Image (cartoon, coloured by chain):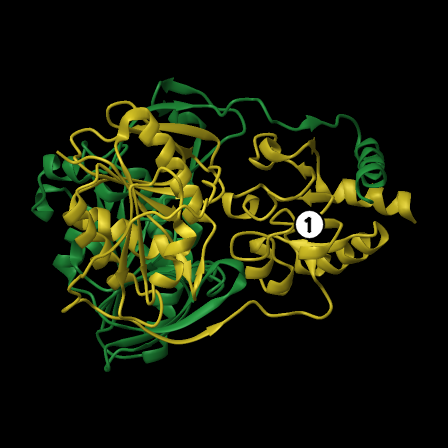
Chain colours: A green, B yellow
Amino acid sequence: MKILVAAKIAASLDEEFELVDARTVDPDFVEWHLNEWDACALEEAVRIREGRAAEGDEVIVVCVGEESAEEGLRGCLANGADRAIRIWDESLPGADALAVASVLAAVARREAPDLVLAGVQSSDAANSATGVAMAGYLALPHVAVVKHLDWDVEAASATVKRELEGGAVELLQVPTPAVLTIQTGINEPRYANLRAIKQAREKPLEELSLAELGLEPAAVATAAGSRTTALTKPAASGRAEMIEGSPAEVAARILELVAARGQG
Amino acid sequence: MSAGVLVVAEARDGELRDVSLELAGSALALSAEGAGPVRILLVDPDPDRLAGALAVDGVEEVLTVASGTESFEPHVWRAAVAAVIDSVDPALVLLGHTVDGFGYGPALAAAGGFGFASDVTAVSWDGSPRARRGAYGDKLEAELEFPDKQRTVLMLRAGAAEPAPATGTAVPARAIEVTLEGVARTERLGLRVAEGDGEVDIAEAEILLSIGRGVDDGGEVERFEELAARLGAQLSVSRPIVDAGWASNARQVGQSGKTVKPRLYLALGISGAVQHLAGIRGAETVVAVNTDPEAPIFAVAHYGAVADLFEVAKELERALA
């Protein structure tokens, strides 16, 4: 049994940041961390493997990202993944969800997993698209926004809860192999202990180029759904009137607002 | 040559969802900019019951596909919409950036080789589509083009556009037969609607004190419940607090929780993820306290303070003691 987990090392911007050109944030102002939704996807995969305790079962984490992503992938290995794959190519910076999904799909073809898990979305781009797009390339069944997963490996069928708007939940069955996108709250990702962190150093972390996956950079570029022409700071209009002062002054102003505007 | 705009309306369990008419409104605006005729597609177990609700002035045609399913199934919707795209050949397809949309939109675009963007907040037409969406957690906005794409699928953020008025004027409707053989199937086993909760109804509260990720200790939640009571408010929470198991789903504000409409919404330690902001559009006054001056919540709040929520909470408690 093999589960492939698609992970992203997501960007968060410092409070102050600068652009180096119209489309690129200065990397000095960016911090990188494992996308929260993907941490839940990985945790779910690791729990399935641990629950079965079967010889040869494997959780593989795959990431499209540059070398700086390795630290995040080591973290995934410390949190229970058996091996990691990182794909990078000089043509990939700025790749959108569909382009990334086309690369991840090539890895899935190579690994032939029984299940693919991805986060619902990433904290930076918030496309909510990569996992399901990957399923589109692979012609696999897919369910998005899964908050409970019960997978019968032998029967090749998963019972999942899909989170709808407004707090409603739909229980449904999907044949596997399938791609499921995992919602936060499905589990609480573990913190690796020192031993696991040490062991992670010994686990395989494979680096692949597009060529090694049999992909042409031009084909990946064609898969991209869009091109970013400009990045801008949102217009300042509509921004809040800021309350200055000490916490006591802020609290006093809040109480004034509650009194003035809170009642009918 | 592909032309026109195809709107994919959305219904759930026999009810048209609000995003449908918002998509129609966006499509009609694009049409006025030269994008061509607007068609609305509804895939549904029984689409005829809802076609009338899509009678919007200026729409060329309402297309219906009977899904042959009991409810939404991602693969069936994807196959049906793909077949209608083949038949109608639109330049632009508009879907809602909704849970059902997430379920098949990206697969539709990937398999079709279409242009694509999701969580789009604004769309325009200048001979070809242009779109705008957030980047880096909505701290920036990205302008997008779709070069070399004959057809583009855009998933529009719910609530981002004004809905087209449903006028009731009859629009020609046409049923399209779609072969769905060989399509993977999911089976709905049950549906659980939001838990009714006797003790709290944040949707009806006049004042909400809402806490989020900034409260990083479950043991503190009770303290904020007490503070809320002293303020004459109800306590509501954002998703991370529910995910951590510190509050019930009944208190959650946002896309996957409740939509609220208080007179005053006091957000403590809530950064303002899109999904959360979707739930507070109806709030009359939003006051936000956050340590991050760039937090997206300040873009929608009327009043804001860059401050530590615990320090402000302490002062509120002192003043109300």
Q: Where does label 1 land, which residue?
A: B210
Tell me: A151 left or right of A264.
left
- Where is residue A225? Give x, y as percent: 23, 38
Q: Which of A237 and B158 is in front in this view?
A: B158
Furthest residue in direction bottom, as rendered = A155
What is the total number of numbered labels drawn onto the structure image?
1
Residue depicted at 21% across the width and 68% down the height: B184
Tell me: A259 left or right of B303.
right
Tell me: A246 left or right of B95.
right
Tell me: B60 left or right of A257.
left
- Categorize mark 1 by other alpha carbons within 10 Å: few (<14), some (14-19), many (20+): many
When asked about the image quadrant of residue B220, the answer is bottom right
Residue depicted at 59% across the width and 63% down the height: B249
Disc 1 sits on a residue from what chain?
A: B
- Where is residue B43? Give x, y as percent: 30, 59
Judge whether B266 appears above or below A19 on screen.
Answer: below
Furthest residue in direction top, as rendered = A21
Secondary structure under the numbered disc 1 in the rendered image: strand
Amino acid bearing label 1:
Ser
Judge whether A130 appears above or below B3 on screen.
Answer: below
Residue depicted at 16% across the width and 57% down the height: A138
Tell me if residue A60 can be seen.
no
Q: Nearer the viewer, residue B251 or A69?
A: B251
Q: What quarter of the picture does the N terminus of chain B occupy?
A: top left
Furthest residue in direction front, as rendered = B170
Residue depicted at 47% across the width and 23% down the height: A233
Judge whether A79 appears above or below B113 on screen.
Answer: below
- Where is residue A40? Give x, y as percent: 42, 59
